[in-house]
Amino acid sequence: MTAVAICGGAELRTACEVLGLEDTGSRPRLVLVDLRVADAARAAAAFDAQIPRIVIGTPDQTGLLAALGDDRVLVASSTDPSVLGPLVVRALPHAARDRTRVITVTAARGGTGRTLCAANLARRLAADRTVMAIDATGTGGLGWWLAVEPRPWADLDALAGAVPFRVHALDRPDAELFSTWKTTLAGSPAAGLAYRWRGIVVVQYTVPGDVIRQQPDVGEALSVSGYYASSQLGQGIVAVVADGSGTLLMADVPADELKRLIL
């Protein structure tokens, strides 16, 4: 809630509650004064003159204030929240955006309680500020502790549902899938997958089989050998088609080595 000084009666206090304004005895950001209430002006005079004011009064009172032309004083004829709300927005000083703070919770191995620690920290901080919690493990464990429904980075079910063809992930114990995404390739929907394998990153694109075959040299190799393999500038490329889906692998290794992942 926004800290303000309320100098007026029950009608003004009720309007401030509706607007999320909290009466404070010191350091208010705004002073609201209802001149129709006895001693309200005297109470407002106790606050620093540099603090913006919103003044509610009778037609004669508001007319006089408007004639003075003080930019720090906004005038209202009623305590209705629909009248005061826009004036509050205009009067409040624009607060500078707080610097974003990043807190990293890590550990040398699993099972040490880092995810639980991060979840409890996020809950505590979220009580009075905006918090973004990122689970860099990609397992979704942090979401479980926070009672939300996360999507792990390697959520193959979600990816498979986003493209109109089958997605065949590499089924090898030494190839660790760590990221998936939906994209386009040659103008067609495509599924992207990334693996860690022998210290390098292997990228896989899956597209409709016709997209793979439409490249003349690739289509010819698929017809003769059942796969396409090429090495250029140290990068290997391998393509196969199965169940109507075309799979393209790329990595910084020779194609003869890369094709062992899929053939």
Image (cartoon, grey):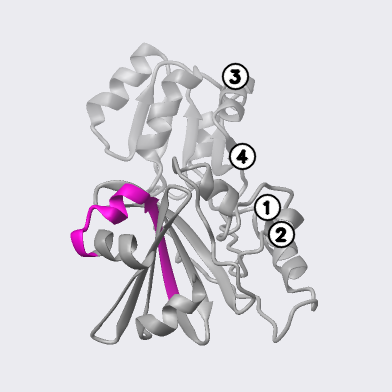
Secondary structure at badge 4 equals: strand
Residue found at the far left of this picture = 216
Give me the C-alpha separation between circle 4 and circle 1: 21 Å
**Horizontal and vertical percent for residue 200?**
46, 83
Q: Quadrant of residue 140?
A: bottom right
* Residue denoted by label 4: 23
Decide: few, some or many residues near mark 3? Use Cα within 10 Å; few <14, some 14-19, many ≥20.
Answer: few
Which label sits in the foreground, 4 or 1? 1
Q: Secondary structure at mark 2?
A: helix
Cα distance between the residues tagged 3 and 2 = 36 Å
Residue of label 1: 127
Instruction: Determine the CA span between mark 2 and mark 1.
Output: 6 Å
Residue at point 48%, 47% (across, down): 29
* Residue 14 locus on image (x, y percent): 62, 23
Residue located 61% across and 45% down the image: 24
In the image: residue 210, left or right of residue 139: left
Q: Amino acid at mark 1?
A: Ala
Provide the residue designation for mark 3: 11
- Marks 3 and 4, how far apart at CA: 14 Å
Q: 86 or 233: which is nearer to us?
A: 233
Q: Nearer the viewer, residue 119 or 184?
A: 184
Residue lying farthest front?
A: 224
Q: Which residue range is magenta in the image?
A: 202-217
Q: Which residue is mark 2?
A: 124
Magenta stretch contains residue 165: no
Please name the amino acid that badge 3 sits on: Glu
User: Answer yes or no: do the residues labelled 3 and 2 have beta carbons within 8 Å?
Assistant: no
